[in-house]
Image (cartoon, rainbow, N blue to C red):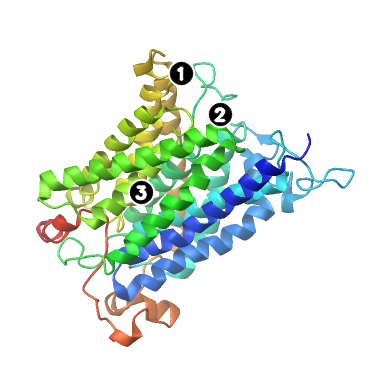
Amino acid sequence: MELDTGATAWMLISASLVLLMTPGLALFYGGMTRSKSVLNMMMMSFGAMALIGVIYVLWGWSMSYGSDVAGILGNPFDQFGLSGTIYDEAGEFVIDDYGVPAVVGVAFQSTFAIITTALISGAIADRTKFSTWMVFAGLWATLSYFPMSHMVWGGGLLSADGPFGGIAAPIDFAGGTVVHINAGIAGLVLALVVGRRKGFGKVPMRPHSLPLVMLGAALLWFGWFGFNAGSAFTADGVAGLAWVNTTTATAAAVLGWLLVEKLRDGHATSLGAASGVVAGLVAITPAAGALDPVGSIALGAVAGALSALAVGLKFKLGYDDSLDVVGVHLVSGLWGTVGIGFLATETGLLYGGGANQLVVQVLIAVVAMVYSGVVTAVIAVALKATMGWRVAEDVEVGGIDQAEHGESAYEALGAGRFSSDAGTTAPAATRTTTEAKA
């Protein structure tokens, strides 16, 4: 295959866009936490970026795309340290079927592993040891993300070559199962294992900086074009379709979320708009190449409404998912994955394609939830018994930033300036009253 410089340039740009999403996530999550823990929250994203950036090159790529082992993972030693990935026997760059050097594919896929791991951190904000988080990040990426990536995209159990492929080819264009269901279930399990923040349901916990939240959402939306349109792997019509679908679904999700807020609470909030952005981006991720723009609007609108309703479940059920990883990523990730079965233009039930695609999408979503949930539970419980997850109670109350990192985000304003506030993506207008009643 000859080098296609246009496709290569597109993939390098896409990889850079996706990498930008993790700092964007740090701003998004950081703005929603208490000011005394904002640096810790942001460091969890940056820490994941540093750690996964190293281990992906060592064994992550090989576990994702190496020779198959039982349909669950690639052989970690097959291309350890990218051996045999970059150059062929003649010393020339290996070129993939799109005319792009394989090393560019490594760059692109590594950014997915980074952002997926970082997403989980929002579920355990304000109360977690940074050292335990870093160990978890490496173990989880190795035991959950890399195998899931192989199962879906590397020819494993959840791919067209797997056991469900005979019913219909599973569709996950850019990561509904691999990224969002995977991270969403992990967030739920961690929230349960780590336990609730002191004062959860009793003390008002508000975002300390909504401008940071909205800036982070904007950067996520911008970077997501690399995430979705880049998953076409070349600059073609599919990439263009994914771009348009990503925009329309996200815009519709914002409207869906704001409509729920207005009807329920009487206010359409900036936090709701930012959260709606993420919900729409999550939902369209697996479906970006399979839907048309009208179907994408429907998918996004439902995602925004569903997640706006789902973020309140933690108060009813009693789990403390601090920044609503479950309500946004799991719920919209599930809807986006299953919604393909209804709205895919070629195989969707509502487009005359029958029920096969819907059945397969439900099956791969269930398998992804079970696999990620079990693996995460094992890692989380093991770390709780050894390193421990929680910072000391006085640290949680007094300020995790100073204790864990020796720094404060707002020195000029004085320590603990906003210490009573904390974040969540629950609708801003109801957050204080909902938590007070919980």
| Image quarter hosting the C terminus | bottom left
Q: Can you give x and y, in whole percent of width and height, for residue 203 in the image?
A: 16, 67
Q: Can you give x and y, in whole percent of width and height, for residue 387 in the image?
A: 46, 67
Instruction: Tell me the amino acid under the disc marked 1.
Output: Glu
Instruction: Tell me the amino acid under the disc marked 3.
Output: Val
Front tag of 2 and 3: 3
- The one nearer the camera, 281 or 185, is 281
Mark 1 and mark 2: span between their CA atoms? Answer: 18 Å
Residue 352, above or below 122 = above
Q: Are marks 1 and 2 in contact (CB under 8 Å)?
A: no
Q: Which residue is mark 2?
A: 159
Front tag of 1 and 2: 1
First in sequence, mark 1 or 3: give its number: 3
| Image quarter hosting the N terminus | top right
Q: Which residue is mark 1?
A: 346
Rendered residue at 22%/65% (across/down): 206
How packed mark 1 is, by other alpha carbons closer than 10 Å (few <14, some 14-19, many 20 or more), is some
- The one nearer the camera, 373 or 159, is 159
Q: Visible in this render: residue 265?
A: yes
Rendered residue at 27%/69% (across/down): 208
Instruction: Tell me the amino acid under the disc marked 2.
Output: Ser
Q: Which mark is residue 278?
A: 3
Q: Secondary structure at mark 2?
A: loop
